Amino acid sequence: MKNIKNILLCQKHFLCLAFFCLVFPALQSQTLNINPNPFIQRTLASFTLAGTDSVSLQLINSLGQVIVSPVSNTVLPAGNYQDSLILDNYPPGTYFLILKVKSGSSKTMKLIKQGPVGINELNLNASIKLFPNPVKDKLSLQFESTLKIDVISISNALGQMIYSMNDPQSKQEIDLGFLQSGIYFLTLRQAQGENKTGQKVFKVVKE
């Protein structure tokens, strides 16, 4: 009788081990890759599924806001998948691509979007003042007249441009009363010869 119990116990352990060996590799065989990374405007996301599963693929910014969802709660069979991430209209910075599958753990990859070739950090030997910040209504911008600024633009946290001005004066007041509370990015751009641009980005907090 004791031998029969030992045999049944061994069989139970064998079945549990077999199930673990079959399922655990399947969960681990899910992959997520980005190429190229860093990138300038567009990159390619590729992922692999070991079996049929419900899948979501989301790109979020550094604030945790979802900006692109190439795949949303879609049931996909086992296989290899690719999707282009087109971020032409989003600012340079750090982003995160998250692969979520119903039967396993999520996978996350960090993406670095670089500025276009020929864009340099603006030389700030000339003083630039931006106040008040945080701002409720009107934002004042001041810079030395020797610093030629060609364009001022403001974008929201999703990279959408919401304000633009060409050839601003060295003392400029910008009315932001129409904006909702949140974080915005003010960019100063300066032409620096053929096919070259200098820029400086400031974070602005709207109360």
Image: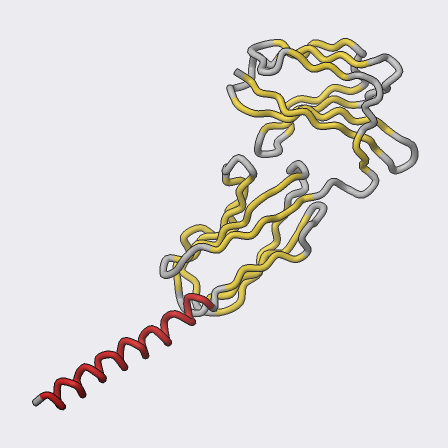
Residue 155: horizontal and vertical position, in percent?
A: 63, 27
Which residue corresponds to the image point at 40% horizontal and 67% vertical from the top-left? 52
- The answer to which image quadrant residue 5 occupies is bottom left
Residue 138: horizontal and vertical position, in percent?
A: 62, 9
Count of marks placed on residues? 0
Which residue corresponds to the image point at 27% horizontal and 82% vertical from the top-left? 14
Is 58 placed left or right of 173 in the picture?
A: left
> Relative to residue 179, is residue 137 depicted above or below?
above
Is 155 placed left or right of 73 in the picture?
A: right
| Snapshot colouring | secondary structure
Can you say which quadrant of the picture contains the N terminus? bottom left
> Relative to residue 27, is residue 136 depicted above or below?
above
Which residue corresponds to the image point at 81% horizontal and 28% vertical from the top-left? 122
Residue 134: horizontal and vertical position, in percent?
A: 58, 15
Is 138 placed left or right of 16 in the picture?
A: right
Which residue corresponds to the image point at 80% horizontal and 37% vertical from the top-left? 119
Residue lying at the far front of the rendered structure? 2
Comparing 62 with 150, the one in front is 62
Residue lying at the far right of the rendered structure? 193
Is 65 placed left or right of 146 in the picture?
A: left
- The answer to which image quadrant residue 67 occupies is top right
